[in-house]
Image (cartoon, rainbow, N blue to C red):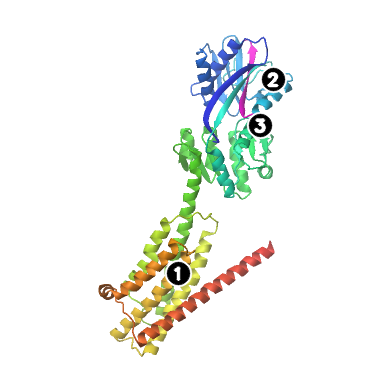
Amino acid sequence: TITDGGIMLNRVEALDAEADMRSIKQALFDLSNEGQPNGTGQAVLAGLDEQGFSAGRVDARVPFSSARKWSSIFDGSAVWTMGAPEVMVSQMDGDYADILRKVDEYAKDGNRVLLIARHGGAAPADYESEPSLDRSSRPVALVLCSEHIRSDAESTLRWFREQGVRCRIISGDNPVTVGAIARKVRLTGDREPRFMDARELPEDINELAEVLDNVDVLGRVLPNQKKAVVQALHRNGHVVAMTGDGVNDALALKEADLGIAMGNAAPATKAIAQVVLVDSKFSHLPDVVARGRQVMANMERVASLFLVKTVYSALISLGVVLTQIPFPYLPRHITYIGGLTIGVPAFILALAPNTRRYIPGFLKRVVRFALPGGIAVALSILLSTWLLPGIMHWDVSNAADLAQLRALNAIVLFVLGILVLARVARPLVGWRGLMVLAFAAIGALGVAIPFVRRFFALIVPRGSTLMATLIMIAVAVAIFLVCVGTARVLSMRKQAGKTEKI
């Protein structure tokens, strides 16, 4: 995924000065000329086609397998095999340490290196049904290809590093080659990336989890190992996202918390992935993360706002039932107040930019925010409903007095709604502070408009009514601050207790 799939054939290097280079290149063309050649095969075909090569005789074929790491053909006179050098030489008789050293030298420059081996004679009867590399095969050439690194890879990886996300590369290629690419894109910043051959990985999931803590790059990874790597990272408590484009990435993408496929990926891989980068641009990933963070953070804000209303509505209803007092306000009051302190602000907050990193504990935080605010609002409104009739000598059985009581309660509720909105919208700088002030002003101005005042059954308090309203607002604000402050102190003590235990 770090590379854009643009592979180029650099050269074919014979390992024997007397080797017939034309025969080797013809075999290389036929080895690559499968029904659906991979990126390397396409690069080889394109490079050799320019040199005048075309399809030759192929009597039998063993297609490339990511598990075997090689492919093979029989051209009627010899069996030709091409694949991962270290895998192939381990299955052939002889000492080829010098060839592996040469492979490592080329791989350190970021080259993808393949080995071509030849075995003279006829192919065995079970050549295609039970493919195996004949131990008497002999290396004849190295194929060097280079990959084009995505121009946006380094900046994208740097962004993830700055966000505290650790990136690892797992690939089926030579670990030295992948390590060189990781170095070019500064996968680990100023630190040298640590790479490892996946054939040395332990099978036990717990041991694998320990190894992965100290590895940045894995090469020669099998499809089932990619899945095991994701499972091991989960075992360590990590949230895992994986990007891929090949069929052999499908199992791991399905296992990951978030599977991301490139637009040019295999159909099966795109079908499993939760996110598909249609234009295959790696640089979209920060935008994907930013959009996810925006949705989660804003959802938390909006949920907190609505849950406060749910809490105080339930508590006020319970208080009315238990004490048999009149309901403190009218439905039209809550329409006016809810629209200005919850409905419209929630819509704005839901669409606002928000880059806050998601932290587990969504429900706990929302409840921790909503309970103190909801309890404070309920206590204030119930207290106002109990006290104001006595202070103002109102008879709640009288429709006019009850209307005044409910209208004053609506004013107190509106002030508390603005306080809740201010808490949700923090920090109150820039447009957030202006939004809170704007809705507070709109609410106050609405009361001054006769039509609005009559429609929503509101009043403009005057004289003793104004004084009583101001007193109840002051009491309500004090109750709100006490409830919120108490909840904060309890939360801090609980957090301190957890820290001491650790």
Q: Are marks 2 and 1 in contact (CB under 8 Å)?
A: no
Is 499 displayed left or right of 242 in the figure? right
- Element type at marker 2? loop
Q: Is residue 115 magenta?
A: yes
- Element type at marker 3? helix
What amino acid is at disc 2?
A: Met
Is 57 displayed left or right of 387 in the figure? right
Density class for disc 2 (Cα within 10 Å; few <14, some 14-19, many ≥20) is: some
Q: Residue furthest left?
A: 451
- Element type at marker 1? helix
Residue 97: horizontal and vertical position, in percent? 73, 23
Rendered position, 213 above or below 406: above
Q: Are marks 2 and 3 in contact (CB under 8 Å)?
A: no
Disc 1/disc 3 C-alpha distance (Å): 57 Å
Q: Which residue is mark 2?
A: 92
Q: Is residue 337 magenta?
A: no
What amino acid is at disc 3?
A: Val
| Disc with the residue nearer the chain's start (1 vs 3) | 3
Q: Which residue is mark 3?
A: 176
Residue 253: horizontal and vertical position, in percent? 53, 40
Rendered position, 234 above or below 121: below
Q: Determine which of the numbered discs, if any, sits on residue 420 in the image.
A: 1
| Disc with the residue nearer the chain's start (2 vs 1) | 2
> Going 35% across and 71% down the picture, which residue do you hit?
443
What amino acid is at disc 1?
A: Val
Q: What span is in magenta?
A: 108-121
Corner quadrant of residue 7: top right
Density class for disc 1 (Cα within 10 Å; few <14, some 14-19, many ≥20) is: many
Density class for disc 3 (Cα within 10 Å; few <14, some 14-19, many ≥20) is: many
Rendered position, 482 above or below 39: below
